[in-house]
Image: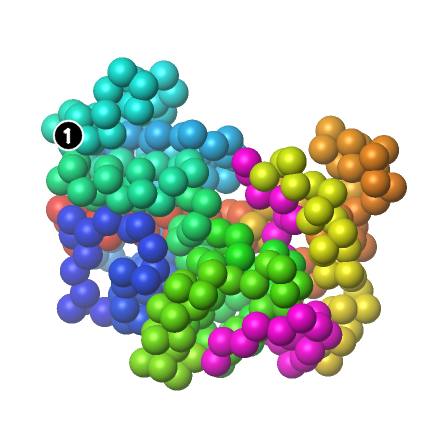
Amino acid sequence: MNKNINLKGRSFLSLLDYSKEEILYLIELSKQLKSKKKNKEYDKSLQGKLLDNKNLVLIFDKTSTRTRCSFEVAANDEGCGVTFLTNSQMGKKESIEDTAKVLGRLYDGIQYRGYSMELVKNLYKYSEVPVFNGLTDDDHPTQVLADFLTAQEHCGKALEDIKFAYIGDGRNNVANALMIGAAKVGMNFSVATPKELTPDPKLMEKILDAAKISGAKIEIVTDPKEAVLNADVIYTDIWVSMGEEDKMEERIDLLKSYQVTMDLLKASGNENVLFEHCLPSFHDLETSVGQMVYEKYGLKEMEVTDEVFRSKHSVVFDEAENRMHTIKAVIVATMSDKL
């Protein structure tokens, strides 16, 4: 690990705020903490409970499985107390500013998962402790660290030598976060999306500016087969994000030709191509939403086929596990007094 990097006291709102070296440091720290968790050889400077006597509060305005569980397990592993705050007055009887100032007096870190990027920025502005973006409508930075770690583990390559292809809704939070991360670390990254769902132009300006510095290649195309050519990783996400359920029919019409199938994997020309997905996934009829979509629109699978999801190419559960290891790296790097 790069011992010259010090992230103590930093918030983690977006990878736009981090340099290539800092992102690579967090991924390397994740690897070391993962080895520690699994009782394998690791950097001995990480011995002991690195977050002893620290406390973290988790605020969720959106539902969560991986993010909540990852933050709680990561914190508990390193001796940190956790409060899952479900019934606060924030935004109701108490302003975001006042809530942030209170929580900043009681906790060493705040995680927020919800809708507004502005809200998480205000928590950062007023709390005076590290704030972690667990997901907003615009960004999902903790997810990307797990995606990149998983790709490295399976490809055995440096990130700048890996080609990612994202297929689907090109302006959702995961697509945004992946493009930001790719641009920062110098990756070859393609997005295949309908013209109606291309990324926000203002965000693309920032992404392309970062790409100029790192040497990354970022391209937006409409043809999925063009995007996946020579890809190491093919990535997709659900077609309708949380809070957009009323757009289900519109998204199905736009994205039904962007489903990740075995034929699309073969179009990569890489017999070892990986499939990644942030989860949850609508790859079968074993959910109430999946059943509803089938009854209303006749689709048994949505963004990815069950064949791909369960294939040898799929690393989605390694990716899900790595959410915990990478989140642990973020909170240790920013909250610990022992690094």
Q: Quadrant of the C terminus?
A: bottom left
257 horizontally vs 157: left or right: right
State the residue at coordinates (78%, 37%).
293
Dot 1 amino acid type? Lys
Considering only vertical position in the picture, is 11 above or below 28?
Answer: above
The quadrant holding residue 233 is bottom right
225 horizontally vs 158: left or right: right
Q: Quadrant of the N terminus?
A: bottom left
* Badge 1 element: helix
Indicate the position of residue 336 as horizontal and vertical percent values.
18, 46
Indicate the position of residue 22 as horizontal and vertical percent values.
27, 65
State the residue at coordinates (63%, 36%).
245
283 horizontally vs 330: left or right: right
Considering only vertical position in the picture, is 87 above or below 272?
Answer: above
118 horizontally vs 293: left or right: left
State the residue at coordinates (62%, 73%).
221
The answer to whether one can see residue 304 in this image is: no
State the residue at coordinates (23%, 69%).
2
What's drawn in magenta, residue-wise?
Answer: 217-243
The quadrant holding residue 203 is bottom left
The answer to whether one can see residue 5 in this image is: yes
Residue corresponding to mark 1: 101
Asked whether 19 or 3 is in front, the reply is: 19
Indicate the position of residue 69 as horizontal and vertical percent values.
45, 35
Residue 224: say if magenta. Answer: yes
